Amino acid sequence: MPVVAKVSDVPSLGKKLVVVEGQEVLLVNLKGTIYAVENECPHQGAPLAAALVKDTYLSCPRHGYRFELKDGSCKEFPEFKLRTWPVRVENGDIIVDLA
């Protein structure tokens, strides 16, 4: 699995869009924990690079759907789930497993 970014590239409560094996992956730093999620809202395809990071979720900029960073779930609309991937951090390097 390749290194996709450095932890220092993703500020606290910030995001960084990377491409991993042809897939757009949004890295989110929630107070030191890095999450990897798809960059497209499952509701209507809005890019989530412009989403707000708040509490434990990512809020879509188009309609405000809130997706939990840990598992991609949406409490208000459970039929919509954001894809997430496992993340490892080793020596400041972020590694995302798309398998």
Image (spheres, rainbow, N blue to C red):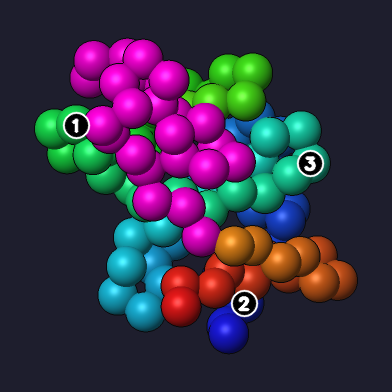
Q: Residues within 10 Å of mark 1 (few under 14, many from 20)?
A: some
Q: Residue furthest front?
A: 78
Mark before the other along the chain sequence, 3 or 1: 3
Which image quadrant for residue 2?
bottom right
Give the amino acid type for the residue marked by disc 1 in the picture: His
Distance of mark 3 from mark 1, alpha carbons? 28 Å
Q: Residues within 10 Å of mark 3 (few under 14, many from 20)?
A: few
Rendering coords of residue 46 (x, y %): 20, 34
- Magenta residues (range): 60-85
Which image quadrant for residue 7?
bottom right
Q: Secondary structure at mark 2?
A: strand
**Residue that numbered label 1 is attached to:** 43
Residue name at image x 58 percent, y 18 percent: 54
Residue name at image x 17 percent, y 39 percent: 45
Does the magenta portion include 73? yes
Q: Secondary structure at mark 1?
A: loop
Q: Residue furthest bottom?
A: 1
Rendering coords of residue 50 (x, y %): 36, 30
